Structures are given as structure tokens and as C-alpha cells.
Amino acid sequence: SVKVVTVTPNGKQIISGCYNNASDEGIIKIWDLEIGKELFSLKNDKFLISSLTVTSDGKQIICGSFERILVWNIETKKRLFTLKGHEAPVHALALTDNDKRLISGGCDNTLKVWNLERETEFNTLNFNDQSVETLAVIEKQVISGGRDNSLKVWDLETKEEIGKLIGHTSRVNAVVAASDAKRVISGSGDQTIKVWNLEKGDELFTLTGHTSSVKAVAVTPDSQHIISGSYDNTIKVWNLETGKEIFTLTGHTSIVEAVAVTPDGKRVISASRDNTIKVWNLETRKQNFSLIGHSHFVTSVVVTPNGKWVISASRDNTIKVWNLETGKEIFTLTDHTSLVLAVAVTPDGKRLISGSSDNTLKVWDLESQKAIASFTGETELHCCAIAPDGVTIVVGEYSGQLHFLELKG
């Protein structure tokens, strides 16, 4: 399907951006406008083309894609360089200052200015800093993190904000609580992980080592280790007491979107934009196997309380349930009509909740494999969590709204 078109400055050629579902790749096609024939095409890996522009001399094509901008030389048909910085599809491009600067607009609500001569980002303008990206429930409190770089603490009963943890210099992508309910761990776009004292509201220490944005964090049940996943495609294991990195797990070929730990603390589950879920043995520090079946990025992963199932959410609009021992898919849930962004399981392991970019939260009965309840928000539902009572559900919206729901029946 053709997504975008533009015309070269001399008016002789049309450039189109399309997505080939069969080969799962974005393609740029260059056409002769007079005879209507395709001259050649450029392949854009597994990313659709969402925007296009051409330099005034007609020598370079610039295309916006998912979280990146690619610059091509038309004569050599070679990719010159890639600009990375957006955290969502790039839907608008414009050149200025004699083609020395590029302005890009993304679905992440940012406007970025790039120096094309230096191949670097010059400036960023943010239009929405309210989006709730991550949630954790700790006894009677809720911790939320988002694009305003802070962590907010909410009272679960009064639904009021009672505190704020400030220290990150970029969006907070992930938050999790230690089992002692006194410490909170957060991962951020500033490439760091921070450990906080929840009672005092103080930062205890910062973990550094990832070379790109930290997208996911988890804690082992004994609160001895932190597990982190990053845009640098790696998973790191840290000592929670000392803040020291212990080792790194490599194997994913794209961003690690989510991490989880089995209830016995022996295995780590990681989900990635390479469309796979990997199971790792923490003792041997090796991969056990991969769970393969999703056709797009895996966005969220959770392990059932009995440690027998892994449940994954994906941008292919589905939720899959896997047998953790065999690595086999058990069943797929397909009621969402758009990207599934988050999943969580009730403490008894009987029900699943899922948040989606179709603006709905669904409650699933895992035995019957059916959706038994639904809630509709105003915008995309980016994150969800279930309180220890198994009744209270907290949902975070892209708009910044936080919803407190009750699971009945």
C-alpha cells in the first residue's frame, strides 16, 4: 500500500513510499513522470515509509519512518546516514536553511531540528509532556512515570497525588517496586536507572551503563537484582544493594521493550522489537530459547503467578499465551483492533488485563479465553497495573489521565 508521495524539484520524477506486507518491508520507488515507468526502488528494512522530502538539488531523498529518518543518495542508490531520536513514526519533514537543516514532526508529539551537515540533532520541541508511560502499584500507593521526566506518587484510596520523585532528565519509561515496598526503581530515556527511597522521596543512587534509553526494568522476587532492557538491544543485571552491574545479556537484534522475572527468580523473560520473546537462565547467564509467533514488535510481557505461562502483547494487535516450559504457544487473544501496549495479570492468575492504542482496556478470563469486560478511554492506553487486592485496576492514558477502576464479579 502506498503511504506517501512527493515530486522531485525538476518535476520529472515521482517518489512514493509504500509498505509491502508480503516481505514486511518499506519501499521507496522512483518513477519517471513522463512515461509512467518505475526507474528503481530503495528498500527500507522492516519499517514503513511515513513521510518523504527531496533536497532542492534533487540529489537526496529523505524519508521518515518508525523512530528514524533515513537519507539516501539518488544517484548511487545508497543510504548515506540515519537520524535517530524520535520515539514514534515520523509523519512530517521539511528542509530549511539551504537544505542544511531538516525539521521533523513525530507521533511522539515532538518537533526536531537536525543539522544535516553534521548528521546530528540540533533541538527538540515537546508538545505533550503529560502522557503516562508506566505504572506500578505498591500496597496503598501508585507510582506513575511519563514524559514530564518525573515519577508521581498517588494515594490508591483518595486517588490524589501525594508526592513526586524528580531526578531524571528525560521521559520515564519504566517503574517497578522492590518487594520491601520501600524502594522504587525507574528507567528513563536519559539512559539511566534510578533507585528511590519511597518513604523519604529521595534518590538512593543511579545506575549507568546502558548506551541508549532504558525502556524496561524488573526486580527479582528477593529484591537482590534489577533487570533492565534498553534501546541498545541489551539486558543488564544489576546488584540492587550496591548499584553495580553484574553482567549483560545479548541476543536481541532490536530494542528490548519489556522484561519480567519468573516467580522463582531463576529466569528472565525479555520482549523485543525484533518480534521475539527470549527466556534467559540467570544462573548460567545463557538464553534457554525464544518464543516466536508475533508478526510485529512485542511491547509487553508478564509471567503468571504460578510461573507456568508467559503472556505477551504486540503491535500485531494480539496477545499470546505461551507455555514457559516447552516454549510453545498455547492460544492467542484477538479482540483488540489496534496495537496492544500493556498487559498485567491478577494475583490469582485467573484474569488478564490489556491496554491498547484502540483506546480500550480489556479484561480477559484466561480459562475461557474470552474478554469479559471492557473500558474505553479518550486516548491510547499506554500502561496498566493491578493492585495486590486483585480488584483495583489502574490505567494510564496518552492524554495524561490516570483511571482507577474496580474489577467486579
Image (cartoon, rainbow, N blue to C red):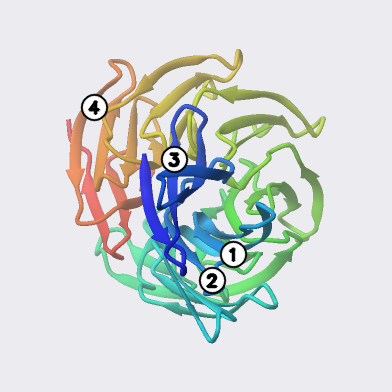
- Which residue lies at the image location 78% right of the left edge and 46% below the top edge? 248
Residue neighbourhood size for the residue with mark 1, other residues' Cα within 10 Å, grouped as few (<14), some (14–19), many (≥20): many
Q: Nearer the viewer, residue 111 or 237?
A: 111
Q: In this view, does 276 lie above or below 14?
A: above
56 relative to 316 in the view: left or right: right
Q: Distance between the residues labelled 3 and 4?
A: 32 Å
Q: How far apart are marks 1 and 4 (CA)?
A: 49 Å
Q: Regarding mark 4 in the picture, which secondary structure is present there?
A: strand
Residue neighbourhood size for the residue with mark 4, other residues' Cα within 10 Å, grouped as few (<14), some (14–19), many (≥20): some
State yes or no: discs 4 and 2 in contact (Cβ < 8 Å).
Answer: no
State yes or no: discs 2 and 1 in contact (Cβ < 8 Å).
Answer: yes
Q: What residue type is labelled 3?
A: Tyr
Where residue 240 appears, as percent x and y from the top left, is 71, 55
Q: Which amino acid does label 2 sit on?
A: Thr
Q: What residue type is labelled 1?
A: Gln
Where residue 214 appears, as percent x and y from the top left, is 61, 58
Q: Regarding mark 2 in the picture, which secondary structure is present there?
A: loop
Quarter holding the C terminus is top left
Disc 3 target residue = 19
